[in-house]
Image: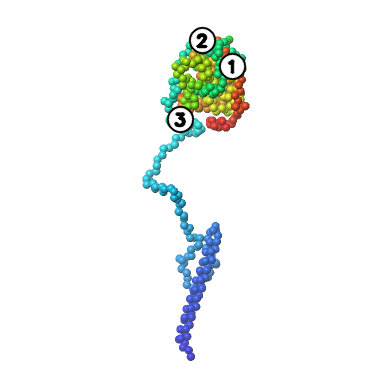
Amino acid sequence: MSDPHNSTKDEEPSKLKTMVGVLSLSTVGLLIATIVLATNQGSTDSSPAIAPTPAETAPTPVDAVPTPVDVAPTPVDAVPTPVPEKLVDPTTEPAEEATDPTPAVTEPCPVYGPLPEEFSFLELKSESSFYDVEDNVCAGSKLALANKLCADLGVQPQAGANVTKGYVGNMDMGAIVPNTKPYFQSSMCPVNVHWHLGSEHYSVGEFDENGAGPHGNQPRPDWANRDLAETEIRDGFRCHHYDATDAKFTAPYDWKHCVGMEVGETYEVHWPHSSAGACGTVNQYQSPFYDGVFCNLDMATFSTLGAQDIASNVGVHGQVFTIVNDESYFYSDMIRGMVTDGEMGSDVTYYTGSTTGTSRDNEMCSSYAPITWQVDRKCHMISASSFDKMCYDMKMQRDDMSDDLHAHGSRELVHDDYAANNHVYEKESRASTGGAVAPVSESVSSSFLDLKA
C-alpha cells in the first residue's frame, strides 16, 4: 500500500507547475495584445490614438498575477522625434553673441506726408552736395549792356515783332540772317526758361487783339502799339481758344510750384539758348538768363564778335499757350525747349531781334542784339499741370530760378521801324510722332507720372 502522506507531497509540485504554466500563458497573451494594439495605433498617422475599451481588452485569468497599473506600454508613435540642429554654413564665421542688453537706438526716417514721391525730392536737394550755389560757375556772368535810345542804336533790331506770315520790318539788316537750323545743330543749349503774361509777339488770327482771356485783351492801336495795363505788369495779346462756358478754361487748378498763374490765360514762353552756356552740366539752367547765355563768354571776347557771330550763337525759342485745366493736354518736359510734336513747333518764323521785357519799349531799346528768334506762329493749349511740372523742374536746378516761377510783363509790340526785314517763314515740320499732344488719363492727380500715363 502507498503512503497517503507521500501521495500528497507528490501532488503539490504538480499543482505548482500548472500555476506557473497558466501565468506564463497569461503573460504571453498580454504581450501579444499590447503588440497588436501598438501596431493598430501606428498604422494611421493622421488618426489620433484611441485607447482600447474594456471589451477589447483580453480577460485576465483570475489566478494570474495582475500587471502593475503604473507600467503602461509606450505606443510606437509616441516616441519623440529628435529635432535636427540648425544647418550652419561652414564657410561663414559664427556671429558673436550680443553682450549689450540695451537695444540699438536709430534715427527715425523723415516723414514727408501724403505728397507724391517726386515732391519729396525737393527736400533731398536741400541736403545734397551737388547743389552748393558756390559751385555755380555761371553766377554773375551777365555782360552789362545798358538800354539805349532806339534812335541811337543803329542796326540793332528789336523783339518781339510781328511774326505773321508775310510781315517784313523796316530795318535793313543787310547780310545778317537768323539761324534757321535747330539750335542743337549749332552747339546751342537752353540756358533758361521764363514766360510773359500775354504774347509779346503778334500773329494774326492766333495771338492778337481779337483774342480773349479771363481778363480781356489788349487793343491794337493805329500802328499796333499797346498802352501800359492797369495791372502791375504790362500784359500782351491773347489767343483765340478761351471759352468762358467751357470748364477747362475756368476750373481752378491747385498750383504747387508756379506762382501767380491762372487757367484760361495766355502766356508766351521763352527758352534762351547759347553756345557759350554750360551745356550738359549741372550749371546749364540759370536765372537771370543772361548768366546762362554768357557763362563761358567774357566781355573781351564778346567785343571781338561780329553781328552775325552773335545771331548764329545766341537765340530764343518762343511759343504761345493758353492754359487749360485738362490733363489730355499734359506735356511733361517743357523745360527742354519749344514743344515740337505734330502741329506744335512746325510753323515757325525766324528773324533777328533782341532781348525783351518791360524795361524796353519803342523809345528805349535793348542793346543785346542781334540774336536769333524762332517763334511758333500758332497758339496751343497746354495743361496747367504741364506748367507746374516745368516749375518743379526749375526748382530742381542748381541755380535758384525762383525769380522765373511767375509770369513777367510783356514788352509793347516792336514798331515797324525797329523790326528786322530778314524774316524767314519757311514751314519746317519737326513732328516726331505725326500727331498732336497725345491724350492721357482724365483722372485728376498731383503725380506727374500719373498724368503722363
Disc 1: which residue = 424
Query: Which residue is at 48% across, 13% downward?
Result: 147
Q: Does residue 262 show up? A: no
The mark lying in front, picked from 1 and 3, is 1
- Disc 3 is placed on an element classified as helix
Where residue 219 is drawn, which disc sits there?
Answer: none
Residue count near mark 2 (Cα–Cα under 10 Å), binned few <14, some 14–19, many ≥20: few
Q: Does residue 167 show up? A: yes
- Between the residue at mark 1 and the residue at mark 3, the CA separation in whole angstroms equals 43 Å
Foreground residue among 299 and 67 = 299
Q: Amino acid at mark 3?
A: Lys
Query: Which residue is at 52% across, 23% downward?
Result: 187
Q: Measuring from the top left, give residue 250's x and y in whole percent.
A: 57, 24
Q: Measuring from the top left, give residue 62's x and y in whole percent.
A: 50, 73
The mark lying in front, picked from 2 and 3, is 2
Q: Which circle's residue, 2 or 1, is located before the other in the chain?
A: 2
- Disc 2 is placed on an element classified as loop
Query: Residue reaching furthest right?
Result: 434
Q: Amino acid at mark 1?
A: Val
Query: Which residue is at 49% across, 74% downward?
Result: 23
- Disc 1 is placed on an element classified as loop
Query: Residue reaching furthest top?
Result: 151
Q: Is residue 342 left or right of residue 15?
A: right
Q: Measuring from the top left, give residue 33's x and y in whole percent.
A: 53, 68
Q: Measuring from the top left, give residue 366's x and y in whole percent.
A: 50, 14
Q: Which circle's residue, 2 or 3, is located before the other in the chain?
A: 3
Query: Which residue is at 47% across, 65% downward?
Result: 72
Q: Are marks 2 and 1 in contact (CB under 8 Å)?
A: no
Q: Quadrant of residue 205?
A: top right
Disc 3: which residue = 125
**In the rendered image of this protein, does residue 367 appear above or below residue 401?**
above
